[in-house]
Image: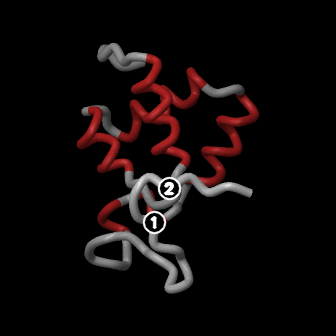
Amino acid sequence: MTNKKFSLREIDRIIEMAWEDRTTFEAIEFQFGIPEKEVIKLMQHELKPSSFRLWRARVQGRKTKHQNLRNFDAGTFKCSRQKIISGNKISKR
């Protein structure tokens, strides 16, 4: 694995970002300083084998995980029906 030591919180955040469809490997490298291959090694080490296989199948060849393969220039996709969140309001059921 990588020589860099991460806190549990940082590892959790890297895993979360790796699972997100629209977060690129380049964004993870920019924020945490580890390239795609190291992210894959970290995921393999931290996840259960079945979870790792699901993740790998999900991200392999996914255009949104690589900055240079994305088909939009800047920003992120936002659905026109998506609610605008303002402030720290907690929704209640």
Q: For this view, does 56 lie left or right of residue 22?
A: right
Q: Position of residue 35 (x, y in %)?
A: 32, 37
Q: Report the disc number at residue 89.
A: 2
Q: Amino acid at mark 1?
A: Ile
Q: CA distance from mark 2 to mark 1?
A: 8 Å
Q: Which residue is at a point 69% across and 39% down the rendered structure image?
A: 53
Proximity of marks 2 and 1: CB atoms separated by less than 8 Å: yes
Disc nearest the viewer among 2 and 1: 2
- The residue beneath circle 1 is 85
Q: Which residue is at a point 29% across and 40% down the rendered structure image?
A: 29
Q: Which residue is at a point 51% across and 40% down the rendered structure image?
A: 16
Q: Amino acid at mark 2?
A: Lys
Instruction: Find numbered disc 1 in the image and state the secondary structure of the residue it sits on.
Output: loop
In the image, is residue 33 above or below residue 55?
above
Q: Which residue is at a point 45% across and 76% down the rendered structure image?
A: 78
The crowd level at tag 1 (other Cα within 10 Å; few <14, some 14-19, many 20+) is few
In the image, is residue 15 above or below residue 48?
below
